[in-house]
Image (tube, grey):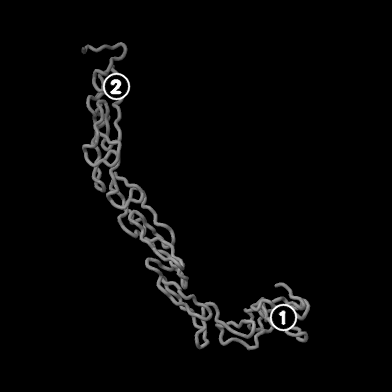
Amino acid sequence: LSACYKGDDNLEATLRPRRFSCVWESGCSCYYFQSSVVVASCNCTHPQCNSISPENPLCPAGVIEVCPTPGCPSKDNLAHWTGTNCDWQCNTGYWRDNTDKCQPCTKCQAGQYASTVCDPTTNAVCTNCPANSVSVYNNVPIAGCKCVAGYSGTITFSWSECVACEKGKYKDIAGTSDCVLCPSGKYSDRVAAPSLASCLQCPDNAFSPGGSPQRESCTCNAGYWGPYGGNCTACKGGKYSNVSGLLTIDTCRDCPAGHFSYQGSTMCHKCPSNTYSEVPVSNISLCMPCTPNAVSIPGSISSAACKCNYGYYSSEP
């Protein structure tokens, strides 16, 4: 606290009485004023002082209250200097009713906000939060209402709207965050989805982009065929598909001769060296081997491609 000096005028009515000026050089801090030259004590004018209180650091032992009244009506009240007279107000959490009694402030429940905030003279008035919003703490203003899971938006004193998450999105907490896209490979046909669990998995061997709003968004992976959102069937061995979204078995393409592929393949593989195949086959084991002491290059399509090693010849024409 800063010191006051002789002749200083009081300009802050909330801190000290206007009608007093400092009459004792450096005798009191600026919260404490000597009421006369004769009385060698300081009158405590701080709002929190209402009695001789050595426990209160703002009121040293022996300091008397500046208010002429001896005290306040009940323990829930607090004397304070208004600048002209002694008044009293209720403590935080109470309000002063028309009988001059301090009553506990009404506590708004979850899902409500205090349209009128409780203060020393007025009780709180509780109002339901806007549609699809909830409050977590007691006696918050309307801005304390937050959009529930499945809804997004911001609530202020001038604007309040919680909008349902679109299909393909979800929001799993109350608050101002935006709705989140369902991950790729999932979809949600539910409006106002409240959790990730609302995003459903596509059928096996099918895929969908993030934020898909319906099961039909799931298309078969490459190597498979089937209807949108339906079961996907693998292309047979000896066939392949390198694009997704095929609807019929006819769209699976044949591998070339000298090649093999397993079912569900996205590409064909050449039969290995020293083998051949006149037709596409469904397994590497179905590639035919050349005769002993003969070799062929990968992907050979007939036995004629098998050539004798050095030092050997074939009796066949």
The image quadrant where one finds the C terminus is: top left
The image quadrant where one finds the N terminus is: bottom right
Snapshot quadrant of residue 236: top left
Q: Residue at x 22, y 24 (%)?
A: 278
Left of 248 or right of it: where is 72?
A: right
Say what secondary structure mark 2 lies in.
loop
Residue that carries the numbered disc 2 in the rendered image: 274
Of pointers 2 and 1, the one earlier in the residue sequence: 1
The kind of residue tagged 1 is Phe
As drawn, the residue found furthest toward the front would be: 158
Snapshot quadrant of residue 37: bottom right
Vertical order, 92 against 245 (above or below): below
Label 2 Cα neighbours within 10 Å, binned few <14 / some 14-19 / many ≥20:
many
The kind of residue tagged 2 is Asn
Say what secondary structure mark 1 lies in.
strand
Q: Position of residue 61 (x, y in %)?
A: 70, 81
Q: Is residue 309 visible?
A: yes
Q: Position of residue 96 (x, y in %)?
A: 52, 83
Q: Position of residue 40 (x, y in %)?
A: 76, 84
Most foreground residue, 301 or 192: 192
Do the residues under discs 2 and 1 have CB atoms within 8 angstroms? Answer: no
Left of 172 or right of it: where is 236?
A: left
Q: Is residue 55 visible?
A: no
Per the model, the C-alpha gap separating discs 2 and 1 is 112 Å
Mark in the foreground, 2 or 1: 1
Q: Position of residue 291 (x, y in %)?
A: 25, 19
Residue that carries the numbered disc 1 in the rendered image: 33
Vertical order, 107 against 280 (above or below): below
Q: Residue at x 62, y 85 (%)?
A: 86
